[in-house]
Amino acid sequence: MNTRIENQRTDDEQRLPALRLMAILDRHLALHRHLLQLAYQKTDVLKRGDTDGLMRLIQKEQPAIAAIQQLERERAQLVAAWSGDENPPSLADCLPKIGGEERQKVERLADELLAVIRELQAANELNGQLIRQSLQWVTLMLDQWLPQPPNVTYTAPNQNAAAHERARSLFDSKA
């Protein structure tokens, strides 16, 4: 009877880190999905050229990013304590220690999280391209509106520009 209670306690002790890990991964997944939705909203805002909307979305991202960083620290601590290793192992290193149903749930959460992160990376890459294109357009417009600097090369007052160019190209070819 005593052995059965000890086995139950050992099972619970091994299950507790797995349950905490699942909770952390679940929160990670929810926060990354939130960031993905914000990234899609950013795409729409960038297409409209709404800089105020873009600033609001960036402000909405900051708490989610801070929460993800905190969760990552918690996950690293949990995994390091669980493994007893100085070098924190990856999630894949912990899977053999998780049994049965919990292992399947952790694998499913990890797969979903990876898929959302990849989608988020693609959305952020698109947004980066849209921002670069917008900056190129702004630069082009500024170049059109700003006065061009005067020509600082010297030409003789009685010599036209075409003759000057021919003379220079002739000299360049002889040199």
Image (tube, rainbow, N blue to C red):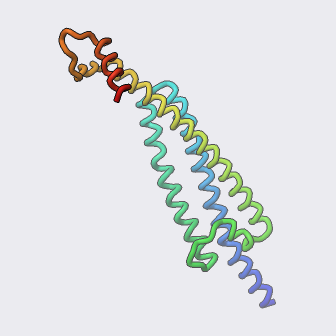
* For residue 6, above or below residue 149: below
Measuring 43% from the left and 30% from the top, which residue is drawn there? 135
**Apparent side of residue 107 relative to residue 156 in the rendered image (left or right):** right
In x, y percent, where is residue 152?
22, 23
Relative depth, front residue between 172 and 154: 172
In the image, farthest residue toward the left: 157
Relative depth, front residue between 127 and 51: 127
In the image, farthest residue toward the bottom: 2
Measuring 63% from the left and 67% from the top, which residue is drawn there? 90
**Apparent side of residue 122 relative to residue 169 in the rendered image (left or right):** right
Relative depth, front residue between 77 and 24: 77
In x, y percent, where is residue 7?
77, 84
* For residue 18, above or below residue 51: below
Q: Quadrant of the N terminus?
A: bottom right
Measuring 25% from the left and 22% from the top, which residue is drawn there? 149
Measuring 56% from the left and 68% from the top, which residue is drawn there? 76
Name the image quarter holding residue 10.
Answer: bottom right
Q: Quadrant of the C terminus?
A: top left
